[in-house]
Image (tube, grey):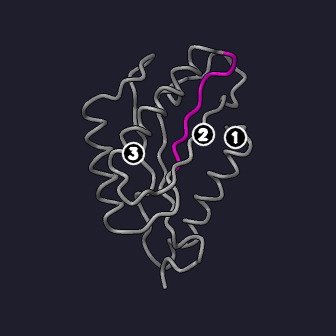
Amino acid sequence: MMNLDKRMVLVGWALSTLASFTNACSLTGLQLDINFEKNTSSIAANEEKILSAWFIGKTSSMEYSTIYIDTTYQRNDLKSKIIAKQRMENIRKIIELMNHKNIPTESTSGPDNYNSSDHLDYSHDTVKIILEPACTKSGTCCH
């Protein structure tokens, strides 16, 4: 597992790389947020449908080099950490069933950067999935 700083650099790089291509063409919808009910790792049926439709639609129209699954948990909270990892694993299993192109998957989970105990923790109930187009490595996305 990567630490939070490395994850933020990786996500930042991926988004900035994608952003650099958006002026010349459209690479939109490459990130999906899956929302969970508080304190549960089970994916709601409607969220599973959204994930399935999104993943199948995206992977049928473009080649991808990596699938990133990312989540955070509340710092110093073991229960939050366990739930975050279970959520990530549940999403990975669903993606694995649809991943007929064998796109490599990278999962990262780490504590948030908030030190305040009173911040809103809704972000801990969301898992992000990011598809990295294969063309970002070669710089040929819009050529």
**Looking at the image, do the residues carrying marks 1 and 2 touch, with CB atoms under 8 Å apart?**
yes
Q: Secondary structure at mark 2?
A: strand
Q: Label 2, on which residue?
A: 108
Mark 1 or mark 3: which comes first in sequence?
1
54 left or right, relative to 65? left
Identity of the residue drawn at 29% across and 46% down:
52
* Vertical order, 71 against 118 (above or below): below
Disc 3 or disc 2, which is closer to the eye?
3
If you read the primary sequence from the N terminus, does the residue marked by circle 1 or circle 2 appear first?
Answer: 1
Residue bearing the label numbered 1: 2
Compute the Cα span from label 3 to label 2.
16 Å
**Residue drawn at x 37%, y 52% as measured from the top left:** 99
Question: Magenta segment range?
Answer: 68-76
Q: Amino acid under label 2?
A: Thr
In the picture of the structure, the residue carrying the numbered disc 3 is 96
Number of residues whose C-alpha sits closer than 10 Å to that of mark 2, classed few (under 14), some (14–19) or many (20 or more)? some
Say which amino acid is labelled 1. Answer: Met
Residue appearing at x 41%, y 18% in the figure: 40
| Camera-nearest label, 1 or 3 | 3
